[in-house]
Image: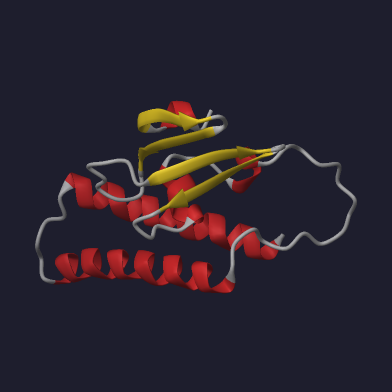
Amino acid sequence: MLLASLEGVRKTSDNKWQARCPSHKDKSPSLGIKLDGDKILVKCWAGCGAVEVLSSIGLEWSDLFPDKPDTGKYIAPRFSKSEFFDVAIKEANIMMLALMDVMGQREISRENWERVLVSIEKLKYMNSEVKR
């Protein structure tokens, strides 16, 4: 499912692939994908966080890991506090720029409006991960 959602995918070795990162305007493959046992690892060498990469193609952390039985125990979010805040600040800045356009009575392009909607979805997802 992950590989099918990406562009420019090529196999680099057993259980490893490269693709263009969907989280930024990637012209050459900077996203590494590795099948490691029963989980999938993703790494953007340009600096995008895993949460950003996944949410930009409509996937969640659970798509990278096999289903585990619910034990009723707290499961920590699968991203660091630093990554959480990096993404939150970036998405808030995107929404702030759109708001500045609106307040300046400038029309927001369709592309920018769609990006604001992506920001909202990313922040909703992150909020749900923190609360689980």
Left-right relation of 10 to 50: left
| Res 15 → quadrant | top right
Measured as percent of width and height from the top left, residue 75 is found at 77, 59
- Which residue is pictured at 52% across the width and 73% down the height? 82
Measured as percent of width and height from the top left, residue 35 is found at 60, 36
Residue 108 position (above or below residue 83): above
Judge by depth and name the residue closer to the eye, 43 or 75. 43
Residue 19 position (above or below residue 89): above
Q: Residue furthest right?
A: 71
Measured as percent of width and height from the top left, residue 95 is found at 30, 65
Measured as percent of width and height from the top left, residue 39 is found at 67, 41
- Which residue is pictured at 58% across the width and 63% down the height? 127
Judge by depth and name the residue closer to the eye, 69 or 45. 45
Left-right relation of 71 to 3: right
- Which residue is pictured at 81% across the width and 42% down the height? 68
Judge by depth and name the residue closer to the eye, 122 or 26. 26
Residue 40 position (above or below residue 76): above
Left-right relation of 106 to 70: left
Q: Quadrant of the C terminus?
A: bottom right
- Which residue is pictured at 73% across the width and 37% down the height? 66
